[in-house]
Amino acid sequence: MRIYLDTSAFVKRYSDEEGSDIVNKVFESHEIVTSHWTLAEAVAAIDKKVARRQITVDERDFSLSVLFSDVLGKVTFVKLSDEFLYPVIETVLSHHISADDALQLFSCMVSLSPVFLACDKNLIRAAKQVGLEAIDVEDGEDRRRLEGMLE
């Protein structure tokens, strides 16, 4: 199954937190799709944990090495292009979400991935409004529903 991961879900792969287990299951046996923007956001999110003293530099570097290993063989990227600008702006205005979230949502639609994983209530709501199977990987009920879909 082709599954799109927003950065908020994608980074669960590289830390031990709520939702990490289900994201790891998705990585093990399904086609992962995300935007190139996710890579930059993921690196920033992991590095921010060093600044907050939640992880060490060595732990960050290990997480980043796993991330880069994953993206080489397991992740399909939606390439960003100039044609995304106006649809992303329309998505911001119609769903009242951030530009980053609108970029992720539009990228998922372009990728034709029927399932969208995130950890942001407003983004999940917007994804459902455009007809995607939107799953909040931090929500227990959503995780159970996703597990059923993965079997």
Image (cartoon, rainbow, N blue to C red):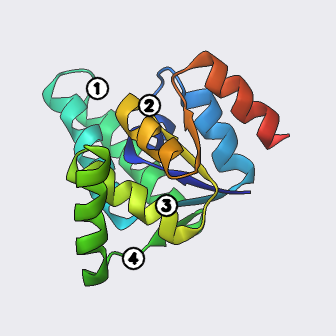
Camera-side mark, 3 or 4: 3
- Label 2–label 4 contact, CB within 8 A: no
Which residue is disc 1 drawn over?
A: 55
Amino acid under disc 3: Cys
Q: How crowded is mark 1: few (under 14 residues within 10 Å), some or many (20 or more)?
A: some
Q: How crowded is mark 3: few (under 14 residues within 10 Å), some or many (20 or more)?
A: many
Secondary element under disc 3, as helix, strand or loop, is helix
> What is the distance, in whole Å, between disc 4 and disc 1 at their CAs?
31 Å
Which residue is disc 2 drawn over?
A: 15
Which residue is disc 4 drawn over?
A: 79
Residue under the image location 44 percent in, 36 percent down:
125
Q: Position of residue 88 (x, y in %)?
A: 28, 64
Q: Where is residue 50 in the image (x, y as percent from the top left)?
A: 20, 31
Of label 2 and label 1, which has the lower sequence position?
Answer: 2
Amino acid under disc 4: Lys
- Label 2–label 1 contact, CB within 8 A: yes
Residue under the image location 51 percent in, 39 percent down:
13
Amino acid under disc 2: Ser
